[in-house]
DNA sequence: ACGTTTCCCTAGTAATCCGATAGGAAAACT
DNA sequence: AGTTTTCCTATCGGATTACTAGGGAAACGT
């Protein structure tokens, strides 16, 4: 009965951290997978697979060979955290494996669907508005930052 | 690379729906597991385990025997959806299996922690404010309902 | 051309989890 | 007693998670 709930997977976490490392490096310099891996403490062969997803998703471009590596495909302020998570890990929010609009409830549970929709909309609003540039520069938007100012937000239960 | 992201498990979904069925039945009448299972289309032996969690979590009281069954331990307007999910499924939001406050990031990822905290705070704000009574009566709070009025909230990507 | 570097691709794997099932013991009722 | 229903433990196949291994393909420097 422990550790489930809405979890952000290691893949998603690693993907965002790798993208942040690229954002911090700048649009011109490219980083090698191994450099990112050791900077962020991510298993480098695992990270290689994730970077492949980011490239296939069009968020990152790569170059092989001696001066090779990865760099962002677009400016860091045009890539939202939600983009990275979706490319690396699939849909942001799902209920029982399917996305909310595909669900159907009956009886007293009928209003559950709008509730899940509301939760998803809210998660989107945050992760879709915060960009790599925001996080890399440690300057979160004000409305997001204000959520973290309530001490209650940092407590466990 | 499909269907991951922040998912609400079948356990959590089933738990909430079962609790809603109990809320709709009223504080005095008790429902048998089998009745809830067939009303909501939930495998009944699986549901039995979930109802056990709800009982151990103090959300539900049970009675065995001929006139037995389950009923809510508290009024439906004092039980939040978040309570049900936590009891059945563990912490609401976790990153890589651990809860946000236990994480530590370095370098350009340092501001990721406040971001996860903000996401969690926001999910809490919704699921902690909406009660079983709200959903069972199909009367979600206004601020939650307003999130669902944007047609964008119902679209896939 | 050659060798190095680095990305890229396919498999594989051990552990865990998820959703579900089975069989029966314990308690409450008629 | 006998029925009903909760309660407990144990198990299951399959999927997922988080990695690891090994090598092929491209870009570079010399």
Image: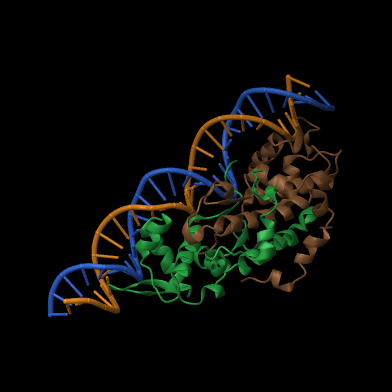
Chain colours: A green, B brown, C blue, D orange
Q: Is residue B134 above or below residue C23?
A: below
**Relative to B29, residue A11 above or below:** below
Q: Is residue A95 left or right of residue B61?
A: left
Residue A102, quarter of picture:
bottom right
Q: Quadrant of residue B155?
A: bottom right
Q: What x and y, as percent, mark residue B147?
A: 75, 65
Q: Determine if residue A154 is in view.
A: yes
Pinpoint residue B1: horizontal percent, then vertical percent. 49, 64
In the rendered view, does A80 fall on the left or right side of C30?
Answer: left
Q: Residue at x 69, y 47 (%)?
A: A152
Any part of residue B44 in sight: no
> Who is closer to the viewer here, B11 or B75?
B75
Give the camera-side residue of A41 and C2: A41
Residue drawn 69% across and 57% down? A147
Task: Please state which of residues B61 and B69 is positioned toward the viewer in this rendering.
Answer: B61
Q: Is residue B92 above or below residue B60?
A: below
Q: In this rendered view, identify the residue nearer to me: A22 or C2.
A: A22
What x and y, as percent, mark residue D15?
A: 50, 55
The residue located at (83%, 48%) in the rendering is B24
Number of labels in the image equals 0
Q: Is residue B57 left or right of residue B94?
A: right
Q: Pick the quarter of the image with the C terminus of chain B.
A: bottom right
What residue lies at 85% left-to-right and 54% top-to-bottom? B137
Image coords of residue B112 (percent x, y): 55, 58
């Amino acid at each position: 009965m422990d550790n489930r709930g809405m979890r952000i997977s290691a893949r998603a976490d690693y993907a965002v951290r790798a993208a942040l490392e690229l954002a911090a490096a700048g649009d011109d310099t490219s980083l090698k997978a191994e450099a990112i891996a050791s900077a962020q403490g991510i298993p480098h062969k695992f990270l290689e697979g994730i970077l492949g997803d980011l490239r296939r998703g069009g968020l990152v471009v790569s170059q092989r060979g001696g001066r090779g590596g990865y760099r962002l495909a677009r400016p860091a302020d045009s890539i939202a955290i939600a983009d990275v998570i979706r490319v690396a890990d699939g849909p942001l929010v799902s209920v029982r494996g399917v996305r909310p609009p595909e669900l159907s409830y009956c009886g007293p549970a009928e209003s559950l669907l709008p509730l899940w929709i509301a939760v998803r909309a809210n998660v989107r609003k945050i992760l879709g508005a915060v960009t790599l540039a925001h996080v890399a520069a440690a300057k979160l938007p004000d409305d997001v930052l204000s959520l973290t100012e309530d001490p209650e937000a940092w407590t466990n239960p």
